[in-house]
Image: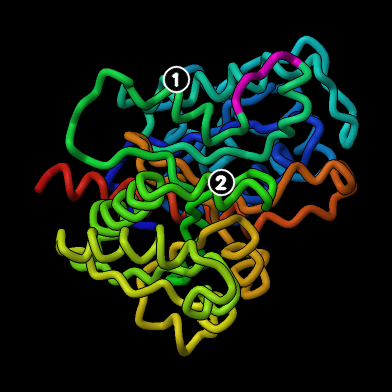
Amino acid sequence: MMAHATQLPPLLLSQGDPAGVGPEISLLAWQALHSLDSSFAVVADLRLMQQTAQRLDLPPPCRIDHPAQAHDCFAQGLPVLNEPLEQIPNAGAPDVAAAPQILRCLDRCVAAIQSGQARALITNPIAKSVLRAGGFAHPGHTEYLAALTLDSHDHTPAPRGPVMMLAVDSFRVALATIHMPLKDVPAALTPDRLARVIRVTHTALQQDFGISDPQIAVCGLNPHAGEGGMLGTEEQTVIQPVIVKLQAEGLRLTGPLPADTLFAPEIRAPYDAIIAMYHDQGLVPLKAFDFWRGVNITLGLPIVRTSPDHGTGFEIAGTGTARAESLIEAIRSADQLSRQRLVGTAA
């Protein structure tokens, strides 16, 4: 993060589930970052944030009415754009009554970024069960944000998301399939889907990470990448043909590679990103490598969106034991990615 002289629009955090750790780690992240540049504000219930700050013995948050005001008070307290709850739930006790306010916080963040009042979104964790009980029709955060930001009438040639990537420093893993039962993965892993995920990842590495000629490793689906068809044929029928097709378009791809060896540090070192075929294939090794600093990055959206790589933490909410490292890294990543997009736009 750089000097205040830039005065770029602030970053925005969404509150997440008010009964989870989101309010607490937002304040802890402010405590860690308030002396640096790239001010941020949280869209949240002001009373909730005040109560949480008091419990943590942190400076009271400052209410603002417009994102641009975040710069003025950021050094003194976490800026809050008030989005009131009808009733504040007890920490650790999720309440479906909060669902509309959770979504209003997200809507308000997205609208501010789309209008140029803010430049990136960092989402605190939500509980999908709470939102679905309130009538939420999307599988999760990512799909909801895609619905808000991706215009179905936009026919620009750039590959579109959303694609889920988790990252710790230069260790980046994008997922071809996300939240689905393992038994459904082979049918979902179509050539079109895999090609889209690889293209979106390649474009994001160039535009958002500033890597001009990215090198990407592609996992196999089956043990030992199918071992020549003895342990499964998806590598031969789906994955390899997609790789050959995209290599012909100029993408630097290697694979399909066995996932049981690819994630070793010396083997993955040459690659700018890895494409994993399913959720646990990619996220288990990354979280085992560094659980606390992992960042969830959504690729292929017209806005920059990051989030911590953990959930709501209902079991520890309100106990003062929540750790903010992942959110801090998500804020740093959102700052860097949005700056890179500005550089690309200027170019």
- Give x and y (percent) for residue 89: 86, 23
The residue lying at 31 percent from left, 58 percent from top is 242
- Give x and y (percent) for residue 337: 35, 51
| Nearest to viewer (mark 1 / mark 2) | 2
Label total for image: 2
Q: Disc 1 residue type?
A: His
Which quarter of the rendering shows the N terminus?
Answer: bottom left
- How many other residues sit within 10 Å of disc 2, few (<14), some (14-19) or many (≥20)? many
Residue 136 part of the magenta segment:
yes
Q: Which residue is mark 1?
A: 66
Q: Which residue is mark 2?
A: 307
Write down the region rendered in magenta: 134-138
Q: CA distance from mark 1 to mark 2?
A: 22 Å
Q: Which secondary structure type mostly characterizes the magenta part of the structure?
A: loop
**Depicted 106 relative to depicted 293: above or below:** above
The residue lying at 30 percent from left, 64 percent from top is 243
**Depicted 183 relative to depicted 217: above or below:** above
The quarter of the displayed image where residue 22 is located: top right
Residue 25: in sight, yes or no? yes
